[in-house]
Image (cartoon, rainbow, N blue to C red):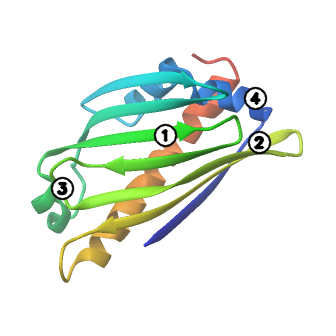
Amino acid sequence: MRFRRELSYEAAPADVFAMLADPAFREKVAAAQDVVSVDVTITPQGEGFTMVSDQVQRTAGLPAIAKKIAGDTTQAIIREEWSDATAGTIEITAPGKPTKMVGTIRLSAAGAGTSYVQELEVGVKVPLIAGKLEKIMADNIDEGLSVEHTTGIAWLRGER
C-alpha cells in the first residue's frame, strides 16, 4: 500500500533539517506520541545524518485484528538516512512482526517556508488480511506525523 503525506512548516528548510537532526526534538515527539520508551541515536554523516529511534509503542485503540498480531505494546524501529538537507530514506520495522515500511523523505523550499513530504510503501505479510492491516498501519503513521508536525511547529517557534 502506498502512503504519502505532505506537511508545511513556516521556517526555512535549513531550520527544519536542523530540527530533524536534533535528538531532543525526536525525544519530544516520542513523548507527545505517548510511547512507552524511546532510544534515539543521531549520527552525522557527510552533509546528512542517520537517525535511529527504537520505540516501544502502545497498541491501545487498535482494532482487535491488529492487536492480535501486535500485542499490548509493540517495538518499532524507525531509521532515517539523510544524504543531505533535502532528501533521505526511511525504514520502519517491527522486529518479529510481518511488517515493513520503506520510503523517502524530502524537504524543499515552499515560499517562505518548507514542504516536508514522506512517501512510504507499507507492507504486511499476513494472508487474507494484509490490506486491512496495511490501512491500519498507514493511519497510525499518519497520526504520528500529525503529532510530529504539531510538535515541530511549536519547536520552530522556540517552545522546547
Q: Which of the two marks, 2 or 1, is nearer to us in this view?
A: 1
Marks 4 and 3, the one that precedes in the sequence: 4
| Cα gap from disc 2 to disc 1, whole angstroms | 19 Å
Q: Nearer the viewer, residue 150 or 111?
A: 111
Residue where numbered disc 3 is placed: 97
What residue type is disc 4 on?
Ala
The residue pinned by badge 2 equals 114
Q: Which residue is mark 1?
A: 80
**Can you tell which mark lies on residue 160?**
none
Q: Secondary structure at mark 2?
A: strand
Mark 4 and 3 residues: CB-CB less than 8 Å, in contact? Answer: no
Mark positioned earlier in the residue sequence (1 or 4): 4
Q: Which percent across, then down, holds residue 15?
A: 73, 26
Q: What residue is shown at x 56% (from left), y 63% (from top)? A: 4
- Quarter that holds the C terminus: top right
Quadrant of the frame with the N terminus: bottom left
The residue pinned by badge 4 equals 14
Asked if marks 2 and 1 touch (Cβ < 8 Å), the reply is: no
- Outermost residue on the front side: it is 46
* Comes first in the chain, label 1 or label 3: 1
- Picture coordinates of residue 63, whole percent (x, y): 21, 64
| Sequence-wise first label, 3 or 2 | 3
> Which sits earlier in the primary sequence, circle 2 or circle 4?
4
